[in-house]
Amino acid sequence: MHHVHMAQNRSKKPAELTRTHLREWREFRDITLEAAAPRFGITHGQLSKIERGVSPYNQRLLEAAAKLYGCTIVDLLTRGPDEAQDLFSAYAALDDDGKRQAARLVDALKRPRR
């Protein structure tokens, strides 16, 4: 009988997960793991693993976290709250009423001054 030997994956490390700023945003908003996790449909242990880069995140979690933490998905993936105080991040974090008010303000600023 002839045996076929499968190549073994001996020294490969698991692919590194992309670092996020989920923990920084959660702490910035003074929200505990225990309070945030149920909002995402996961346990606080699972959220902790995601924040530490041990477990992967998904789009649904990012969308829910951005809404809960008052930031954008881009903020969660690229910058912490201390770095996100730019105009675009501030606008994206506004609710619909705030965005309407901001649009009116920009329109007023565009008018010629006398």
Image (cartoon, rainbow, N blue to C red):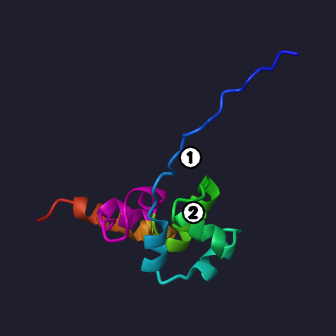
* Residue 33, x across and y down, in percent: 58, 78
Give the residue number, with chain letter if any, for mark 2. Answer: 50
Q: Which stretch did the figure color magenta?
A: 72-92
The answer to which of 110 and 19 lies nearer the viewer is 19
Residue visible at 22% across and 60% down?
Answer: 111
Asked which quadrant contains residue 104, the reply is: bottom left
Give the residue number, with chain letter if any, for mark 1. Answer: 14
Residue visible at 88% across and 16% down?
Answer: 1
* Residue 67, x across and y down, in percent: 55, 68
* Residue 112, x across and y down, in percent: 17, 59
The answer to which of 104 and 114 lies nearer the viewer is 104
The answer to which of 10 and 82 lies nearer the viewer is 10
Looking at the image, residue 39 lies above or below residue 5? below
Which residue appears farthest toward the top when viewing the image? 2
Please indicate whether residue 112 sits to the left or right of residue 15 in the image: left
Say what secondary structure mark 2 lies in. helix
Q: Mark 1 is on which residue type? A: Pro
Which residue appears farthest toward the front when viewing the image? 1
Tally of numbered discs: 2
